Image (cartoon, rainbow, N blue to C red):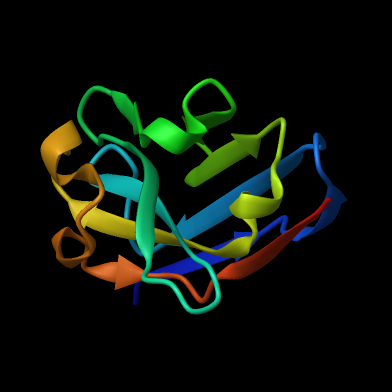
Amino acid sequence: QVQLIESGGGLVQAGGSLRLSCAASGITLNVYSIGWFRQAPGKEREGVSCVSSTDGSTYYTESVKGRFTISRDIAKNTVYLQMNSLKPEDTAVYYCAADLGSQRESSCYIMYEYEYWGQGTQVAVSS
């Protein structure tokens, strides 16, 4: 049984930082790529970042480049999203998702590429 469990969300002031975790079970990170998505109220879910299974390549959507960092600990089977310089527009529910195989930037942000999803963790950034 595959499970993805996100944690680390919370309320933070603009300019602050949070680190999200995605703990995976039932899969291994050297086989599955992991993506982070977010969904703000009234908006569609959007891809934020992903890390590819085979070589650990990382990709970021333009709005978070230079502020967010995705990383993985294969021994702990956990992927992290370090979020710095947070802005009110980063407020959303953040989800991690798993896709069998490697990822490229062209597919990193496409929801239907991913087979498994976590339940989400809320991030709120106050101005």
Residue name at image x 14 percent, y 45 percent = 107
Where does the image place residue 124, in percent across and percent down from the top left?
A: 74, 61
Q: Nearer the viewer, residue 15 or 35?
A: 15
Answer whether residue 74 is visible to the viewer in this image: no
Camera-side residue: 1 or 88? Answer: 88
Q: Is residue 30 above or below residue 34?
A: above
Residue 85 is situated, as x and y percent measured from the top left of the image, at 72, 31
Classify the position of the N terminus by image quarter.
bottom left
In the visual, does 97 lie left or right of 83? left
Q: Is residue 12 left or right of residue 64?
A: right
Report which quarter residue 23 is drawn in.
bottom right
Q: Position of residue 93 (x, y in %)?
A: 57, 68
Q: Residue at x 55, y 76 (%)?
A: 41
Q: Is residue 17 above or below residue 95?
A: above
Residue at 70% of width from left, 31% of height from top? Answer: 84
Q: Is residue 118 above or below residue 9?
A: below
- Number of disc labels: 0
Q: Is residue 15 left or right of residue 108?
A: right
Q: Position of residue 99 (x, y in %)?
A: 21, 55
Q: Residue at x 53, y 28 (%)?
A: 69
Would you identify the image quadrant in which residue 59 lies? top left
Mark yes or no: residue 99 visible.
yes
